[in-house]
Amino acid sequence: MSGKKGLSTVVTTLIIVLLVLAAIGIIWGPIRSLLTSSTNSLGGTACLELDLTATRVNETAAGVYDVTLRRGGAGSNTQNVGAKLILYSDSAVSDTFSFGETLTPLQVKTASVDTTVGATVTGLLGANKVEVVPYFIDSDTGEERVCTTSTSFSF
């Protein structure tokens, strides 16, 4: 023998463990950012499950409408859901109005919408259609998230 010494098995094992930990650290960065962006986009799927429709609309005074909304049972993970309303007549479109109430699954509520107050198109008379756009409050950020889906009801 010529006096050469090799690495001991303990040192070799330690080097392999350190290399594996370094590789995990390098790979974890992109995976973490991917997971974070995926969970942030889950709010969009909540809108797909919501079933919020108008069931009745009555003009109680000039430009004042009682709107009844019904929420279906789907989307039960999103508890309190509100609505933005847009009223249409044959010749005009209203501004966007808040329904002013939130609905839980399977709930029906009626609220009054006054198109004569604080609107660009003041006092929309003779409306014959309402568009209902649901929204919910994001539990993580507290922000209002307006859905891109909507339903229409002609009356």
Image (spheres, rainbow, N blue to C red):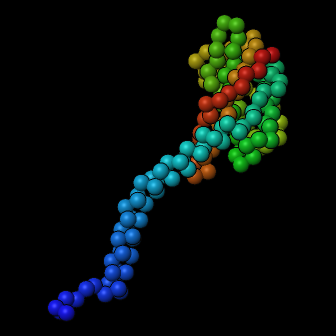
Residue 2 visible (yes or no): yes
Image: 114 above or below 18: above
Q: Tell me the quarter of the picture where residue 107 sits.
A: top right
Q: Residue furthest top?
A: 91
Q: Image quadrant of residue 133?
A: top right
Residue at 41%, 65% in the rendered image: 24
Quadrant assignment for the C terminus: top right
Query: Which residue occupies the extreme front position in the image?
Result: 1
Q: Residue 71: which quarter of the image? A: top right
Q: Position of residue 2 (x, y in %)?
A: 16, 91
* Closest to the observer, 76 or 118: 76
Residue at the (83%, 36%) spot, across then down: 108
Quadrant location, the N terminus: bottom left
Residue 79 at x, y percent in the picture? 72, 47
Q: Is residue 111 above or below residue 9?
A: above
Q: Could you tell me if residue 136 is visible in this image?
A: no
Q: Left or right of 12: which side holds 52? A: right
Residue 44: percent from left, percent from top: 60, 40
Q: Is residue 74 left or right of residue 143?
A: right
Give the answer, above or below, for where 28 lies relative to 8.
above
Most distant residue in the left direction: 2
Residue 80, given in percent of the width and then of the height, sits at 71, 44
Residue occupying image coordinates x 65% and y 10%? 92
Along the viewing direction, whichever of 96 and 2 lies nearer the viewer: 2
Q: Is 154 left, or right, of 28 in this rendering?
A: right
Q: Residue shown at 45%/53% (left/top)?
A: 33
